[in-house]
Image (cartoon, helix red, strand yellow):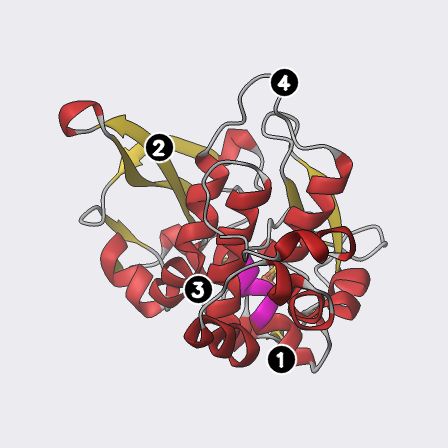
């Protein structure tokens, strides 16, 4: 998260044009990689943990901390800055980002910010609308450069489509407000966090507990969650909806009761 006074809160579309260039010889190179709060998405964690060759719990324990959103009571993983005066990102060096091809979605979008809001659709349906805004920080000289973009071209160049596609269900979940009195309790926050971010642990939980004896999950889905992190993320969203009692996304098996205690 960037300082609010650097956010230019005009809603922009994918066709909005802007001038910007970021390169190694610019005088502010890497100045944007310190003292920031980067909220991670599930797919950010998958890409970074794979890049570093770590299981998800080691990655989360070493490089992130958990923050509970006051309004939603949802838990988020935040990238931990170094504990030095500059509070640098652990992945930045004088030569740039050491995890550049696996950098988080927020770093890819920067200096563009992205938001989603609900709006009324047809017949009372609620639709989501994506919008964009600029983050103009005094230390960033990229806006003085001449290269012209549209936001659509910037998104393509930064390869954010894949991130947005994989994270879409999870992001939609963040827009859902818990009814008063239905905030997540600490146990549900831990389950929410595990199914969002600690995906190796979540997979172990599915396969090493009575989970598959309790819930009726089809074979194709079981194969998917065993072998593919993208499918595991989607299944995590369905699991979270179930534990939050938002939707009956999982079905109990007929004889689930005899396993229920240990699930
Ligand atoms: S501050 Fe702006 S121009 Fe400078 S390195 Fe960061 S994104 Fe690029
Ligand atoms: S992950 Fe890379 S791009 Fe993002 S803040 Fe850290 S060093 Fe900068």
- Occupied quadrant, residue 263: bottom right
Q: Earlier in the sequence, mark 2 or mark 3?
A: 3
Q: Say if disc 4 is inside 8 Å of ligand 2.
A: no
Q: Quadrant of the N terminus?
A: top right
Q: Label 4: state its secondary structure.
A: loop
From the image, give the main secondary structure of the stretch colored magenta: helix
The residue carrying mark 4 is 181
Farthest residue in the top direction? 180
The residue carrying mark 1 is 51
Q: Earlier in the sequence, mark 1 or mark 3?
A: 3
Span of residues in magenta: 42-46
Disc 3 to disc 4, C-alpha distance: 46 Å
Q: Is the residue marked by circle 4 packed among few (<14), some (14-19), or many (20+) residues within 10 Å? A: few
Disc 1 to disc 4, C-alpha distance: 40 Å
Q: Is the residue marked by circle 1 packed among few (<14), some (14-19), or many (20+) residues within 10 Å? A: few
Q: Is the residue marked by circle 2 packed among few (<14), some (14-19), or many (20+) residues within 10 Å? A: few
In the picture, measured across the screen, residue 135 lies left or right of residue 54, that is: left
Disc 1 to disc 3, C-alpha distance: 23 Å
């Amino acid at each position: 998260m960037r300082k609010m006074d650097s956010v230019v809160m005009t809603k922009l579309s994918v066709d909005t044009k802007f001038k910007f260039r970021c390169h190694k010889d610019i005088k502010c190179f890497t100045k944007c990689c310190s003292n920031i709060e980067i909220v991670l998405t599930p797919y950010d964690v998958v890409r970074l943990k794979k890049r570093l060759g770590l299981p998800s719990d080691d990655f989360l324990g070493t490089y992130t901390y958990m923050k509970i959103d006051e309004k939603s009571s949802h838990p988020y993983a935040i990238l931990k800055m170094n504990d030095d005066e500059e509070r640098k990102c652990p992945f930045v060096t004088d030569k740039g980002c050491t995890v550049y091809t696996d950098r988080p979605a927020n770093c890819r979008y920067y200096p563009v910010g992205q938001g989603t809001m609900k709006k009324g659709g047809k017949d009372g349906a609620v639709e989501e609308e994506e919008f964009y805004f600029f983050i103009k920080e005094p230390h960033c000289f990229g806006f003085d450069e001449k290269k012209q973009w549209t936001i659509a071209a910037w998104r393509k160049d930064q390869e954010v489509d894949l991130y947005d596609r994989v994270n879409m269900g999870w992001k939609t979940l963040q827009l859902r407000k818990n009814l008063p009195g239905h905030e997540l309790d600490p146990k549900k926050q831990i389950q929410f966090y595990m199914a969002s971010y600690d995906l190796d642990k979540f997979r172990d939980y599915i396969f090493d507990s009575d989970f598959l004896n309790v819930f009726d999950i089809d074979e194709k889905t079981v194969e998917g969650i065993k072998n593919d992190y993208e499918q595991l993320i989607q299944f995590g969203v369905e699991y979270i909806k179930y534990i939050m009692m938002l939707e009956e996304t999982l079905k109990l098996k007929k004889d689930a009761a005899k396993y229920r205690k240990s699930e």
